[in-house]
Amino acid sequence: MVSQSIPKPVPGNINSIAAQYARAKALKDAEDEAKVKDILKERGLDTPKKPWNPVEELNEKKADYFKKEWGWVVGVFVWLLFIHASGIYFFTKGFLLTRLVLDEKSSCAEPPIPLLSSFPGVGTPEAGCWHPKTFEKAVVIIIDALRYDFAIPFDKISEVESYSGPRTPQAFHNALPFLYETAVKEPQNAFLRPFIADPPTTTLQRLKGLTTGTLPTFIDAGSNFAGEAIEEDNLLIQLRDAGRRIVHLGDDTWLALFPGYFEPNISRAYDSFNVPDLHTVDNGVTKHILPLLSPEKKGLWDVTFAHFLGVDHAGHRYGPNHFAMTAKLQQMDDVLRKIVAALDEETLLVVMGDHGMDQKGDHGGESDDEVEAALWMYSKKGVFGRTDPNYVTPPPTAKIRPVDQIDLVPTLSLLLGLPIPFNNLGKPIEEAFTGKRGSVWDSLAPVLRMAAAGTKRYQSAYYRARGIDEAGIKTTEGSPHVLWARAEGSPSSASKERYQAFSNFQVETLRIFRDLWARFDAPCMILGIAILAAGVASLILYANENAQDGPEVDAPELEMAQRELDLKSLSNGDLVNRDESTSRKVGLAALTGTLIGSLSAPIFAAISGRVTLDLDLLNVGVGGAAIGGLLCVIFVEASARTGFSNPMPTTIWGWLAFIFVVCQSVGFASNSYTIWEDSILLFFISTFGLVAAISSLRIERYTDRTLGVYHSVVFVALGWLASFSKLCREEQMPYCQSTYYASATSSTSATWTILIPFILAIGLPAIIKSYYDGSRSYEGFAPVWIGWAFRLGLILNAVYWIIDAADDGAWIPSVSQQTLKSVRIPIAQTVFAMAIGGGSIAFGYAPPCVSISTTAAPTPSSQMVNSAGATVTILGFANAHGSRYFLIIINIILCVVMVQETMGAGAIALMAWQILSLLEILDLNSLTSSPIGPVVLALLGSFHFFKTGHQATLPSIQWDSAFIALHKIRYPWSPLLVALNSFGAQILAVAAVPLVVLWKQRPRRKGILRSVATAMAWHITYYAVIGLATTMWAGHLRRHLMLYRIFSPKFMTAAAVLLVVDIIAILVSLTAVRFNSLSIAEVFGWA
Amino acid sequence: MSSTGQPSPSKFSLPIELLPTGLAPIFTHIHPVLLLSAYYLRFPALVADPTSTLLNSLAPLAVVQMSYAVICLPATGTSPRPPKKAKPGSKKTNTNDTSSAKPLTAFLALLLSLLSIPVLAAIQVLFGAPITTHIPQTLLSSAHLALLAVFPLVYVHGSSSARWREIISVYSPIDEVFGAAVGCFVGAWLGAVPIPLDWDREWQKWPVTIVTGAYTGYVVGKLAGGKLLKGKRIELD
């Protein structure tokens, strides 16, 4: 900013009297010091104690104040990190229970417990592994969403005393009578029972449960996190290992879970998510299943899985009480009759629903209607029995004699002569093993004992893997161990009691695992949401309280008078820190509340006897600490507010920030707005740019106006340019075309994009330099840092990616992949060493980017005549804070660019450029104390998250980035690299937040730390509100069909981003501000 | 902003007043009704075939807007009520305020306002409108925006750069012409809201919602600008 006349002081005007004064002062100080030193040197006294200097002491005092204040600010943000982490922890604990996937598999020859009686061929799949094989073949039919009452005659349902539904049959009643009829007419051949699903009742999760025999959770944390394929032991693995040929027909979810399992020529998969289409899948399955049962094709397969979707789709589209449902169920009835007619004696037929549906026909949650499916088993062999003659009639409601869906796995395994999968928790279904005659209990007890032994084996393996100590719970009355000992110890003659005892063991073990894994825990989720909401409230109060009304006005006289006053009060010994933020107060309140809460809550809980386990006590302590801290902080902040102060925005800029945050948060309740988040962010970013252009046009001074409009246009144009980098999520098809990779089916960059890193190496340093030139700040370390080190890093990055492209494209066949890898990985490591190692140290010691020179020729920049009469020029004075702080941003750009594909590197460069233009816009329009700057930075961070090839979905995580700088997975570096790749844009944005305050900031500006803390609080508020909103929606929509595809991943992304931003804010932004301020003050003194 | 306190009348323009004829106040109320009812009637056709409907309705829209301008608005360079104190440098120009000059001014204003179409289309593209496809739709919706919002402004304010700087920086005093223009653009902005929803409705197609928002916003802004907010200015901070 060069100006000849000074109509009024504007921020950044380097010719203001204050600036001149400061310069004079600094120079004078330096000169005086030098003189003193010279004199001392002459007398050989250059290291003795310095003479008392009040200005120096004042500076020391102020440096002390700054450091203390900084400590409290960091304290507040650390506390906020704790609040966010604990809120997310409690919500997640209630919402996404994780389960460890164990790699062990059952084997045919090794039963978990020795068999009580042997049979010929025991331990071979031909005769039966752990139990004599009953059936050679099986047809397993899944009618998606077959609710139990669909299969029960309406008059039987309405006879039940507790029945309170409609008095006349609904559209779904009596349309599928075949199952009930056969169960009643031929009890030896068929039985029908309620089949209870474990929530979440979505097809994918249900199929996992139905094939593994365990309870699925959202995250099955196993060795292969990225893929969907089931890796833990399951029915299909056992079938395949035993050499059985498996056929699949219908829903293509099976292919994702079991890739390569199915006989290629006779299996047929159909798209599962085309909900409006009721018939394609069903007709396809029907067409292909009947020929398979014919004598000619019988020999081609052993087990067939057929998955009908029409009933489910009819439910989603029309709801159960619709004639389309009647037609669909009648069609199923007809198909089943045909299949039964074609069935031979050696084949077992199983028909089941994987879940039910609620009254609107949707599912996913845990309501009764959603979990109550039907199970019907049929064979012409007549092997099914009942433990009680009354059980011949199927139960009229699903509340009576239900079986768990996981019970299917041990039942099918044993009937087909296979070992029970290792992680099975189910118990064999009675009817299948009771037999037609003889003592039913004699045949049942050994079967259950075998399944129970498997469960016990799994339990110890799981506890071992999780590091849970079993010793403490071994002797507790009612624990599985005690129940097991009792069952195993009971006399083998009393089969019925023995069966009951094993059954008790199974039920209790299942209960414990269920507690551990797969249940929405509403109070826990609400606690998490409450903590996050209170966190947002205290964050907004904190930001509001520390916000200044407007940009600080330069008043040189005032400043000089203040300085005199400071010196006076220093000699009187009553100097106070006038620029204090409320951080100390808030920090103390948080500390007090946290201590009280963390101590009192566990004590209270222990006394009231509600908690027994150590783990619970820890949770209570964390919850107490969070609630206590929040209560104290909000109380302190709220009581400090003066009567009528308004937390709502008061300017259009404030409203704009408010609208950006709130509209997006509300939008995340809709799957469409979640899917199209990237477009919405571009819309908001362009809106800001347009308003910035309008605002800039209002600036009086011509040059400033032109610059303001120019930067606004640049800001919008760059955002738009970046929007061409897209990685579309599945739901965006067909309206979106991915450009991030070479093609939709590839995960390597297009060849032309190899130009991008080279363009960056040439262009980006030059662009950054041009922004430094505006305030003549390309001084000090800046030329070396930006022009040489940064450029070198970018060139290395370009070399890395060209080698990577050569590897991907096999351009140089004579060089092996291994060689290329061993060349390029050290390059990446060098870049990181430069940026993080060298860069951080250099940043700590770098002088301000100013140049103080004594020249004879007058220049239009800041100049003055010093005591010696020479003209002294300080270049870069007006941007002393910003130009130095930006050096750390350069390091971060380098790190982030290094871990992105070429396209993502381009996006990050555009983002860096946008940030610079944003800073100019904010400065020119005097918006540095408005929340709009930090919020737009957050928008930029979120926007470029998408532009670096990410989506709020698990499959879009770029796992490959772990190998950019490493040969193999190494902790903690590999996850850090993936995090840097995923959240690079947000990391860059949060690191740039202090620049909102620091850019174009002269030295000796008061209250910088306070302004930085405010800006940071606004920035984090954005992510905290988004985090809170997505959390609330995920919790609220936990029954939504799209929960696991859209809302859960969005919540997880938002939560991860919030924590990452919190951590970077402390570790990078605030830390860098400390070094920066100390370094500037060392040269120019404190305000 | 720096000079928000009391804008001096010499520096800032005054709100537009309607022509002091008997017809002006009547037609200015018929005008929005005409626009909205015509829009309502053409809406099914717009949804069915946006391109041709938008194209075919351009001429009628131009006629409506030109009649509105000629009947109700003071043409550029004229002043319906001569200011009490003659401004330095501005003479009374009643001589060219003849009935034949006004349609000519309107026609010139129409041509000038068409120049804004590429700019408006570019802004839509920067906000995320498709650039490789749907180009006729984007251009036509820009043409409608130009006729609705830009044309009356050109007719009233001419090509005075000071006036236009004020208009582009949205700092003109609010009157029914400026209010309508602001309303039109805000409406078009809000019109983007329903586009991403997965309701699979025909009317969600580009640029139906934008044009709908523009028409609605135009009428709302015109009413609010002419009555409620007249003479006020939009402050950003």
Image (cartoon, rainbow, N blue to C red):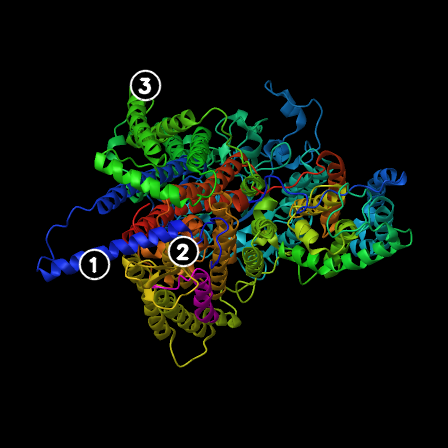
* Span colored in magenta: A759-781
Relative to A804, does residue A86 appear above or below in the rendering?
Answer: above
- At x 71% / y 60%, what residue is drawn? B118
Residue identifier under label 1: A34
Whether residue A153 sits left or right of residue A447 in the image: it is: right
Q: Earlier in the sequence, mark 3 or mark 1?
A: 1
Q: Nearer the viewer, residue A696 or A56?
A: A56
Above or below, A235 relative to A399: below
Q: Label 2's element?
A: helix
- Amino acid type, callout 1: Ala
Residue A771 among magenta residues: yes
Residue B115 at x, y = what percent? 75, 60
Mark 3 lies on residue = A608
Towards the viewer: A593 or A542: A542
Farthest residue, direction right: B100
Q: Residue furthest left?
A: A44
Q: Which residue is mark 2?
A: A879
Of the image marks 3 and 2, the number of the one nearer the N terminus: 3
Does residue A312 sit above or below B205 in this rendering?
above
Residue A303 seen in this snapshot: no
Rendering coords of residue A349 (x, y %): 56, 44
